[in-house]
């Protein structure tokens, strides 16, 4: 373990009773925070203080606390998941903050992610996008032997790179258009790269992009804010790939003929 | 505390009436007869089926959306049943299966290194210290290959060789390479596979998904599980749901230790509520302490992070041979890299030469504890040992190690601030997985008809110790293959009368009322201590007295301390906020209240089992070399607890284990 000490901070935290209530910033002091603690453990300390005073604690989403479930979601000093690149809030440790610093904490801000309470937002819009096409249709039990279809290591690696997305929504929160392109393109790239995903390739990209638009996410302006804050290192390359798949699928759809007279 | 819950199903007396183990296996455990390799096939043929056109008339509730729950809900939905799935997270993609790192076992024998279904079966039985059911474990091994096929077909990007075939790695407790993996995120990829299948069904409308809903109670109608009560975690609404059957895939109870590798929300409530309605709770004392977690940094710690067991393929575990050197390292006066090889005790390699650093988890954990108890621990707290990659890096180069474990090394550096490429990692055991759980028969049905239990929530496949890469296998085996085969049989036997109507059966309204009263009771205490305070206290008791080494005396003390703590909780807990809004304190308080009761059952079970086996180590039962000493004559059975009512001692009954294929042996990894 590296040398640990304790620090004190001033926190400006977004408080909002419910989705329909108005929100505001409240200022709190938190002291004796071990630099070995995580950011969420620091909030735990504050919450225990608040509870001891009979006040309501700050509600925030979190679960695995090891950077993989994608549930934690907050904007710290203007950056989704905070100042340290490549990590989720739960993996941000207090050794990256200075004693006496003021830290501003807000929920992920995006119209398709309405605030539920304090720092908790509703990200079910992401689930809807996956429901539209983020899958390979294969009935349980109908699969062929796993080694019958060899997949070049490079292809498998690309699919795995894309599949690492944790669905946290930081990309949306960072984007001025609240675009979900990085999230959607990660899933599209994973499945469209693999031979298993080929049969539904066109249908998938069209359906997922439509669901994304329907949910109110904006378009991509190629600024790259999303990749800057992504805790898993997803890049605009996936968006480029999705745009290509989308263009091809759209053109194919336009010229699609069935060979049969329509009823 | 008082509660309206009383057991509605009695099984203990029925069980005690069956004295012949074989008769018990056939009648109670429902294990098919005949040769082991044919049991599952035979049972599948015996199962009654539901006509495709009738399937939508059956409503199945699945609680939990991890590997077992997500896969079961998706598969049942796909078959045409009308499924409702509930999870406490904001999305079914978050369940804690997602955090599994290392891999999933299967008997594919793609490596041509002598693997087979029988060997996977045998290794799992042996790894479980001969305390699991033969029939169940054989089925698990048999189904393992189809799981890999299914996941690959879904687009799970498993690691591959340059030739395009699937790659494998080794894991603890086995001498073959049978573990399939997706970098260090296998659980994530498998869960996202199940989530994608589930999402498809949600999109099609065969599965209705209820996020941010916590199961607060089970509804039993005429002795059968016919619904649940949930609390909507956003609005606070308490509501009952009726169904033809209920499937609990609600995970393990590792958070009874407060600090564990489990997610923050993991809890025992659903399983414990079922227990209070008469579902037998089996082997709660079988808890797994994982040997390779990042050591505790201090009092503010909220969780422990696992470092995958796969690291032990290349990392060597050691502590200094002398206490003096260990002390200097703890004080920061000696750099571990400067400790000469001859002064290092690679204790796993020394004690278990044939398995070395890949000795099973229970054995590795105890060995770490022994070294630290001997004053040779290396973390500042004294509770830590080294996992050192120096030799592997020298042999293979840093790039190879980065390719294999890059994300784990990054995670370690993130948390500790120490670069593991340059310095040995520090690790220490932590609560990770619970082998015990709700008792189920071969068909995964609990002692309450209509209540099925899958994944970590049931007790069935890992005996007293789970091998690495077997949890994902079991979750998916239950979810994709066993539950979807077994549940229709129960439904077909129920007939087409449909789920009980809420208005016809007062049980639903009564269960809702009981949940509301319990919530109000929690809110009304208005004490001065937070729910977290009690959870932390409880965790401390359990870790100290029901952790890696247990004694009868310590467990008796623990039971008394838990009772006192529970009384204190109901007098002094403070739950701030309102019940009708999102309230994180109320959520925690309700879970801690159940942990406070469950913990006593855990200690009772540990005290009753006068032997050491797998993850359950009783200091009184050790060989001269300090290894676990089983007492097969008395304890070759499953210990199952039946709830008797408030403030009454639960009754412990036995399911005898019948071994027809495996010879009971002393586990040796030397």
Image: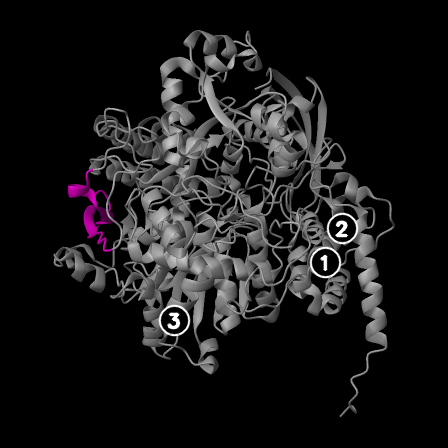
Which residue: 41% across, 78% down?
A: B50
Q: Is residue B661 shown to the viewer in this render?
A: yes
Q: Quadrant of the C terminus of chain B?
A: top left
- The magenta span reads B631-660
Disc 3: which chain? B
Locate residue A10: give its quadrant. Answer: top right
> What SS does tag 3 mark?
helix
Q: Which of marks 3 and 2 is in front?
A: 2
Which residue: 50% across, 54% down?
A: B67
Q: Name the residue under label 1.
A: A193
Q: Is residue B272 shown to the viewer in this render?
A: no
* Disc on res. B549: none
Query: How many neighbours does mark 3 have within 10 angstroms: few (below 14), some (14-19), or many (20 or more)?
Result: few
Spatial distance from mark 3 to mark 2, Cα to Cα?
A: 48 Å
Residue A4: x, y in percent?
Answer: 59, 16
> What SS does tag 2 mark?
helix
Residue B467: x, y in percent?
Answer: 41, 43
Disc 1: which chain? A
In this rendered view, identify the residue nearer to me: B548 or A124: B548
Q: Name the residue under label 3.
A: B503
In this rendered view, identify the residue nearer to me: B157 or B581: B157
Spatial distance from mark 2 to mark 1, Cα to Cα?
A: 16 Å
Which residue: 32% across, 74% down?
A: B46
Q: Mark 2 points at which residue?
A: A182
């Amino acid at each position: 373990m590296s040398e640990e000490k304790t620090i004190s901070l001033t926190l400006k935290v977004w408080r909002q009773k419910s989705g329909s209530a108005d929100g505001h910033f409240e200022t709190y002091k938190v002291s004796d925070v071990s630099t070995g603690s995580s950011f969420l453990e620091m909030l735990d300390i504050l919450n225990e203080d608040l509870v001891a005073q009979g006040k309501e604690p700050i509600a925030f989403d979190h679960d695995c606390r090891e950077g993989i479930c994608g549930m934690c979601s907050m904007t710290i000093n203007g950056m989704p998941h905070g100042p340290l690149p490549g990590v989720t809030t739960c993996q941000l440790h207090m050794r990256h903050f200075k004693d006496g610093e003021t830290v501003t904490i807000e929920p992920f801000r995006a119209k398709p992610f309405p605030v539920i309470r304090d720092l908790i937002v509703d990200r079910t819009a992401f689930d809807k996008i996956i429901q539209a096409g983020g899958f390979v249709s294969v009935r349980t039990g109908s699969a062929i032997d796993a080694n019958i279809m060899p997949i070049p290591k490079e292809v498998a690696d690309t699919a795995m790179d894309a599949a690492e997305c944790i669905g946290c929504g930081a990309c949306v929160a960072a984007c001025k258009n609240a675009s979900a392109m990085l999230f959607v393109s990660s899933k599209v790239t994973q499945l469209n790269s693999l031979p298993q995903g080929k049969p539904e390739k066109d249908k998938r990209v069209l359906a997922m992009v439509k669901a994304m638009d329907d949910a109110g996410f904006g378009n991509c302006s190629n600024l790259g804010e999303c990749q800057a804050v992504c805790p898993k290192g997803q890049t605009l390359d996936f968006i480029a790939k999705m745009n290509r798949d989308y263009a091809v699928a759209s053109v194919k759809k336009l010229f699609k003929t069935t060979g049969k007279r329509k009823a | 505390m008082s509660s309206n819950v009383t057991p509605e199903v009695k099984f203990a007396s029925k069980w005690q009436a069956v004295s012949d183990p074989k008769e018990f296996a056939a009648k109670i455990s429902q294990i098919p007869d005949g040769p082991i390799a044919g049991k599952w096939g035979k049972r599948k043929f015996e199962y009654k089926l539901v006509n495709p056109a009738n399937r939508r008339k059956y409503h199945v509730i699945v609680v939990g959306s991890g590997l077992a729950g997500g896969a079961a809900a998706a598969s049942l939905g796909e078959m045409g049943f009308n499924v409702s799935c509930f999870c406490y997270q904001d999305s079914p993609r978050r369940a804690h299966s997602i955090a599994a790192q290392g891999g999933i076992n299967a008997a594919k024998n793609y490596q041509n290194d002598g693997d087979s279904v029988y060997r996977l079966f045998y290794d799992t039985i042996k790894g479980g210290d001969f305390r699991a059911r033969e029939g169940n474990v054989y089925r698990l091994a048999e189904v393992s290959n189809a799981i890999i096929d299914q996941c690959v077909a879904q687009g799970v990007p498993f690691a591959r060789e340059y030739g395009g075939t699937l790659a494998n790695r080794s894991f603890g407790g086995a001498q073959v390479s049978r573990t399939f993996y997706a970098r260090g995120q296998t659980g994530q990829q498998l869960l996202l596979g199940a989530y994608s299948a589930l999402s498809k069904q949600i999109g099609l409308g065969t599965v209705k998904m209820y996020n941010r809903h916590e199961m607060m109670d089970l509804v039993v109608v005429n002795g059968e599980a016919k619904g649940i009560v949930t609390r909507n975690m956003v609005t606070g609404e308490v509501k009952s749901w009726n169904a033809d059957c209920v499937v609990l895939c609600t995970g393990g109870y590792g958070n009874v230790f407060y600090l564990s590798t489990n997610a923050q929300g993991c809890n025992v409530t659903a399983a414990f509520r079922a227990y209070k309605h008469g579902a037998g709770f089996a082997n709660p004392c079988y808890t797994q302490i994982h040997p390779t977690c990042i050591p505790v940094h201090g009092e503010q710690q909220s969780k422990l992070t696992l470092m995958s067991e796969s690291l032990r393929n290349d990392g060597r575990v050691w502590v200094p041979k002398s206490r003096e050197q260990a002390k200097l390292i703890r004080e920061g006066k000696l750099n571990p890299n400067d400790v000469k090889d001859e002064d290092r005790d690679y204790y796993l390699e020394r004690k278990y030469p044939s398995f070395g650093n890949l000795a099973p988890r229970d054995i590795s954990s105890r060995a770490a504890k022994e070294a630290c108890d001997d004053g040779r621990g290396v973390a500042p707290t004294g509770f830590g040992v080294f996992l050192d990659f120096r030799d592997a890096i020298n042999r293979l180069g840093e790039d190879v190690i980065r390719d294999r474990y890059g994300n784990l090394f990054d995670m370690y550096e993130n948390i500790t601030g120490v670069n593991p490429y340059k310095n040995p990692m520090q690790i220490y055991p932590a609560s990770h997985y619970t082998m015990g759980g709700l008792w189920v028969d071969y068909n995964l049905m609990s002692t309450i008809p209509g209540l099925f239990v899958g994944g970590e929530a049931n007790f069935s496949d890992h005996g007293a110790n789970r091998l690495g890469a077997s949890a994902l296998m079991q979750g998916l085996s239950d979810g994709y293959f066993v539950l979807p085969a077994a549940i229709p049989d129960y439904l077909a036997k129920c007939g087409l009368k449909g789920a009980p109507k809420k208005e016809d059966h007062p049980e639903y309204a009564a269960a809702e009322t009981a949940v509301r009263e319990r919530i109000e009771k929690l809110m009304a205490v208005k004490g001065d201590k937070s729910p977290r305070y009690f959870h932390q206290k409880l965790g401390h008791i359990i870790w100290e007295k029901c952790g890696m080494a247990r004694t009868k005396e310590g467990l008796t003390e623990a039971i008394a301390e838990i009772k006192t703590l529970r009384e204190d909780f109901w007098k002094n807990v403070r739950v701030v906020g309102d019940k009708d809004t999102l309230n994180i304190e109320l959520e925690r308080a309700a879970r801690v209240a159940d942990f406070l009761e469950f913990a006593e059952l855990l200690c009772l079970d540990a005290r009753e089992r006068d032997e050491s086996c797998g993850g359950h180590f009783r200091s009184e039962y050790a060989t001269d070399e300090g290894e676990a000493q089983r007492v097969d004559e008395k304890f070759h059975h499953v210990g199952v607890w039946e709830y008797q009512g408030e403030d009454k001692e639960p009754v412990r009954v036995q399911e005898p284990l019948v071994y027809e294929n495996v010879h009971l042996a002393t586990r040796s990894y030397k």
